[in-house]
Image: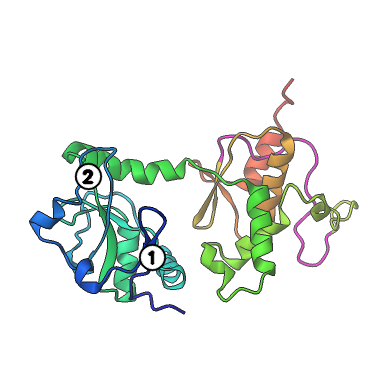
Amino acid sequence: MTDCREPPPFAEEGGRASRAPRAARRRPSAGAAATTKPEGAGGRIAVRWLPVEALTPDKRNARIHSARQVARIADSIAAFGFNVPILVDEKGGVLAGHGRLLAAKRLGLREAPTITLGHLNEARRRAFVIADNRLSELASWDQALLGAELKELKSLDLDFGVELTGFEMSEIDLRIEARPSAPRDAAPHPAAPGSQSGDRPPPSHKGRAVARAGDTWGLGPHRLRCGDAAGAGAFLALDAAIRQWQSLTKESARLHPTGETFDSVERSRRSESPVQ
């Protein structure tokens, strides 16, 4: 495995990749920094390796990074390299990448790749810090594609653990089992009421789904966001995924922000009058 303490090569203009000599990665002087500073929002950016101790976290950063998440980021860097630079201002203040900075410290790295955003004024920097975190939360997973990709990765002869994707093995199995594109997943569930097989979750309920567009379900430390779907089958698949998670973890999924359990919401929503 490549030593993550040595910066990996970065692709440069024209598709070339090279490793900059250590001397070139030293912190540049004020005059040299001016040659790589973007001239505007559309200016070019440059990756510079700076000492980790020279990077200062933003005290106003409202994003919280748990020790568990930092450990996962560190594992990812160790396995794949430091591929996503930390975004900083001209003084080394961190704008985005606080988790990666904590991971670098956890790994004992002396340097980290950075990109200086010199084209933002103070107000825009503060807004960007929030936007960088918030906008990523608005994305959602295509559960069918995710399950298929995880299943294929799991079947390969990998030289790393598939958990480096950021999902735990129980979560990976859950998403593979709940793929909407795999109707055979529902076949093992017996039709007889109340019957089960081994550790399999209870048979999925027919009719209207419990999960709805706009829902956010808490699955332990994870969040499952329900986007819009073309058919009810996608939401029934989400129901199956939640039930599978509950069966594997023996915990209750909870609807945010009310904190209601999945079973409680199911009883409430199934008692509603059918939508005409």
x 20%, y 40%: residue: 39
Query: In the rendered image, which residue does mark 2 sit on?
Result: 38
Q: Answer with the quarter of the image where residue 168 lies.
A: bottom right
Classify residue 60 as left or right of residue 152.
left
Q: Given the image, on which type of amino acid does mark 2 rest?
A: Pro
Residue 86 can be seen, yes or no: yes
Q: Answer with the quarter of the image where residue 49 lies.
A: bottom left
Question: Regarding mark 2 in the picture, which secondary structure is present there?
Answer: loop
Q: Given the image, on which type of amino acid does mark 1 rest?
A: Val
- Asked whether 208 falls inside the magenta stretch, the response is yes
x 71%, y 53%: residue: 178
Task: Give the residues drawn in magenta, as a range.
Answer: 196-215
Classify residue 81 as left or right of residue 262.
left
Question: Residue 70 shows which numbered tag?
Answer: 1
Q: Residues within 10 Å of mark 1 (few under 14, many from 20)?
A: many
Q: Closest to the observer: 250 or 119?
A: 119
